[in-house]
Image (tube, rainbow, N blue to C red):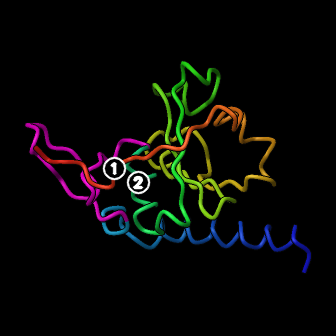
């Protein structure tokens, strides 16, 4: 099987897994979300303490699930990477890269609702990735903590 065909099948497999998760499981169950009112306002958080409305929370949760060897978190500030879909929506953006090959970004679809899919192949989707994330030269590896103190 050609490398291109293998990538195509791998992408479809990831997309199916992602879509099946949405159709089969409750968001709370899959992401292990809980309500937290430690700061005086009730909010949804991941088990790590990250807010479920932040792109960083999704990136960190994916890294926690798959491990730092497989997932690298990247980010940028929109002031350093102007004109990106995700960055223009907020002050910046964090996302996960799995196996140095796939951008996995559930925040785009689950929270911001600004793009129809949240899985991108770094080579096959090279035409759309700069529109959403800007050039990869503007991305920085982030060392986001896996647990946020609750106090």
Q: Quadrant of residue 27?
A: bottom left
Of marks 1 and 2, the one in the foreground:
1
Residues packed near mark 1 inside 10 Å, few (<14), some (14 to 19) or many (20 plus) = few
Q: Mark 1 touching mark 2, by CB under 8 A?
A: yes
- Residue 45 point in image, percent of width and height: 26, 51
> At 27% across and 57% down in the image, what residue appears?
48
Q: Which residue is labeled 2 in the image? A: 60
- Tell me which segment is drawn in magenta: 31-55
Image quadrant occupied by the C terminus: top left
Q: Is residue 84 above or below residue 52?
A: above
The residue at the point 81 percent across, 74 percent down is 6
50 over 32 or under it: above or below: above
- Sequence order check, earlier mark of 1 and 2: 2
| As drawn, 148 above or below 63 | above
Say above or below: 4 vs 54.
below
Q: Can you give x and y, in whole percent of width and height, for residue 134 in the image?
A: 68, 32
| Relative horizontal placement of residue 143, taking residue 129 as reference (left or right) | left
Categorize mark 2 by other alpha carbons within 10 Å: few (<14), some (14-19), many (20+).
Answer: many
Residue assigned mark 1? 145
Rounded to the nearest whole Å, what is the CA distance between mark 1 and mark 2?
A: 8 Å
**Mark 2: which secondary structure?**
helix
Question: Residue 96: where, in percent of width, then height?
Answer: 54, 52
Residue at horizontal 79%, vertical 68%?
7
Q: Identify the residue at image location x=53%, y=71%.
A: 20
Q: Magenta stretch mostly in which secondary structure? A: loop
Residue 136 shown left or right of residue 24 in the figure: right
- Residue lying furthest bottom: 1
Tell me, yes or no, whether the highlighted magenta stretch contains residue 43: yes
Residue 141: % across, % down: 54, 44
Q: Is residue 53 magenta?
A: yes
Q: Is residue 50 left or right of residue 7?
A: left
């Amino acid at each position: 099987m050609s490398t291109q065909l293998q990538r195509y099948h791998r992408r479809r497999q990831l997309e199916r897994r992602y879509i099946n998760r949405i159709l089969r499981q409750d968001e709370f169950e899959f992401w292990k979300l809980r309500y937290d009112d430690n700061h005086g306002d009730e909010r949804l958080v991941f088990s790590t303490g990250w807010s479920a409305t932040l792109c960083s929370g999704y990136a960190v949760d994916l890294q926690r699930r798959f491990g730092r060897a497989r997932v690298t978190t990247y980010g940028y500030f929109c002031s350093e990477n102007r004109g990106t879909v995700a960055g223009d929506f907020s002050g910046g953006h964090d996302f996960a890269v799995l196996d140095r090959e796939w951008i996995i970004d559930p925040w785009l679809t689950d929270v911001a609702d600004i793009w129809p899919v949240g899985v991108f192949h770094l080579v096959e989707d090279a035409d759309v990735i700069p529109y959403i994330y800007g050039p990869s030269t503007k991305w920085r590896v982030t060392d986001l903590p896996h647990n946020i103190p609750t106090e």
